[in-house]
């Protein structure tokens, strides 16, 4: 008589019977779940430094990689078809866990179970990490946000998958597949779903799921509020010495309130470019023609700006305006802005140059020049160079570099300068066809191209 054994090396009729029974159990007691099938990372275009529009110098020689720091592609591609499967999951209460270091919600993770053979027949493979589940039975018909006029859908992401312990039959063959689910959040990986699925269960709203789930605008508002308060508390780097009175003295070292001080309080990052004791000061790119003794003047063409005092025969340097805002920006000339947050461009391959003698009258360009017109009131220079968004321009006023804005002026490149100028000033511009970000920027080196979308 052969030895009795429930286990058999091959899956026979007993196994098929148990599978059909479990299938019926899921059909009767399960719930429909919509599966968005993960197909893999989204193919990235090959990019090189010579390709038009490329602004990432780190892409030179490296193709198809979004994040060069972690060597990963964040964008994911999902099947356009949506699969319906029957599953079973345990409903959890959203309780607060006070035993941890802080306050945590314990009900945001769910475990769902699916029939193994049904899963293979429907989607063609096992559920895996990256698949997205839509829960139609968890639709929220009464959202708290009054701006949302319809019910909100609920999406979960598969974080882990394995055979379910309760799915092993008496014959030792598995029949169930168990996945760990967590709520879908607005992140780069799920843009293929977030940007293509409407957030509500009706077509009367154009808001996508990503627009409803995203907390980007809220975080941005919080960050702006923090920066604003920080600028109020600490407006500039270094130390403010404007409250200190500087005693003016004559050439003999005696106090004399009839003259202006020849020095200021010195210290680490105390130079603000302002004269002592609240004296008046003029500013510009050139000294006045007829100065008076003791007059202060701030030269704006020095970087940083430099404060001078006229002693009767020459302009004597008093201090440099080294104090600057701690918030990185165009007006911040410190390493905090110039290296860590570098927004400057490296330009090469000049294709056009011209010099304009500024006049408030109608400007008449010389023959064969690159300039078509110049408007004194707006500072707009219209050139004859065809407009391309990848082109850039550098401008100089009286041989001093100034900022500009390049725009499309009716099909040709327009250059707008915002600096104060007068009749007779010389404005020069050079247009370049090759423009890339400066490479010494730390933020550009660490920022993946996926974050630049």
Image: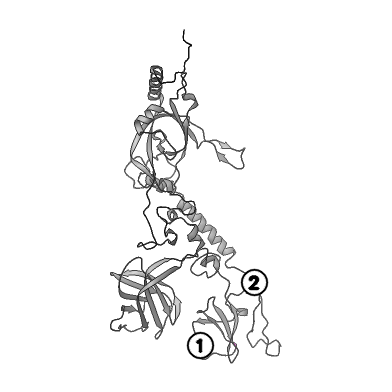
Determine whether the residue tagged by mark 2 lies in a helix, strand or loop.
loop
User: In the rendered image, which quarter contains the C terminus?
Assistant: bottom left
* x and y percentages locating residue 23 in the rendered image: 38, 23
Q: Residue at x 70, y 86 (%)?
A: 255
**In the image, residue 293 lies in the stretch drawn in magenta:** yes
* x and y percentages locating residue 273 in the rendered image: 57, 77
Residue behind mark 2: 268
Q: Nearer the viewer, residue 254 or 432?
A: 432
Count of residue discs = 2
Residue range in magenta is 289-295
Q: Earlier in the sequence, mark 1 or mark 2?
A: 2
Q: Nearer the viewer, residue 128 or 222?
A: 128
Q: Nearer the viewer, residue 220 or 171?
A: 171
Based on the displayed image, in which of its 4 quarters is residue 234 positioned?
bottom right
Residue behind mark 1: 288
* x and y percentages locating residue 300 in the rendered image: 51, 79
């Amino acid at each position: 008589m052969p030895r009795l054994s429930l286990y058999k090396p091959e899956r026979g009729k007993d196994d098929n019977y148990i599978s059909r029974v479990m299938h019926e159990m899921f059909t009767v007691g399960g719930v429909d779940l919509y599966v968005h099938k993960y197909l893999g990372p989204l193919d990235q275009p090959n990019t090189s430094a010579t390709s038009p529009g490329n602004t990432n110098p780190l892409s030179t020689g490296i193709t198809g990689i979004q994040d060069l720091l972690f060597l990963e592609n964040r964008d994911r591609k999902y099947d356009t078809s949506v699969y319906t499967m029957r599953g079973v999951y345990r409903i959890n209460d959203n309780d607060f866990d006070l035993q941890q270091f802080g306050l945590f919600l314990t009900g945001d993770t769910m475990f769902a179970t699916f029939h193994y053979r049904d899963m293979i027949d429907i989607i063609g493979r096992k559920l895996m990490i990256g698949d997205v589940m839509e829960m139609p039975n968890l639709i929220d018909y009464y959202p708290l946000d009054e701006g949302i006029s319809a019910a909100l859908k609920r999406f979960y992401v598969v974080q882990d998958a394995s055979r379910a312990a309760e799915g092993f039959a008496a014959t030792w063959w598995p029949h169930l597949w168990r996945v760990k689910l967590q709520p879908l959040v607005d992140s780069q990986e799920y843009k293929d779903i977030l940007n293509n699925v409407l957030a509500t269960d009706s077509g009367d709203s154009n808001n996508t799921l990503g627009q409803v789930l995203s907390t980007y605008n809220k975080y941005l508002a919080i960050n702006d509020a923090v920066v604003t308060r920080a600028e109020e508390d600490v407006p500039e780097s270094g130390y403010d010495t404007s409250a200190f009175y500087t005693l003016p003295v004559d050439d003999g070292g005696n106090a004399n309130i009839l003259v202006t001080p020849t020095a200021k309080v010195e210290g680490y990052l105390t130079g603000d470019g302002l004269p002592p004791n609240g004296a008046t000061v003029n500013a510009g790119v050139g000294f006045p023609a007829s100065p008076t003794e003791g007059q202060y003047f701030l030269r704006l063409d020095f970087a940083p700006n430099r404060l001078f005092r006229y002693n009767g025969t020459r302009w004597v340097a008093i201090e440099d305006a080294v104090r600057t805002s701690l918030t990185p920006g165009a007006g911040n000339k410190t390493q905090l802005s110039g290296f860590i947050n570098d927004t400057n461009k490296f330009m090469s391959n000049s294709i056009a140059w011209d010099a304009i003698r500024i006049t408030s009258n109608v400007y008449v360009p010389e023959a064969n020049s690159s300039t078509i017109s110049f408007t004194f009131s707006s500072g707009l220079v219209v050139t004859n160079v065809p407009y391309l968004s990848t082109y850039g321009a550098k401008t100089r006023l009286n041989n001093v570099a100034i900022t500009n804005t390049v725009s499309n002026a009716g099909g040709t490149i327009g250059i707008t300068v915002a600096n104060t100028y007068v009749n007779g000033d010389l404005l020069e511009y050079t247009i370049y066809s090759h423009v890339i970000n400066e490479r010494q920027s730390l933020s550009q080196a660490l920022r993946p191209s996926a974050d630049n979308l």
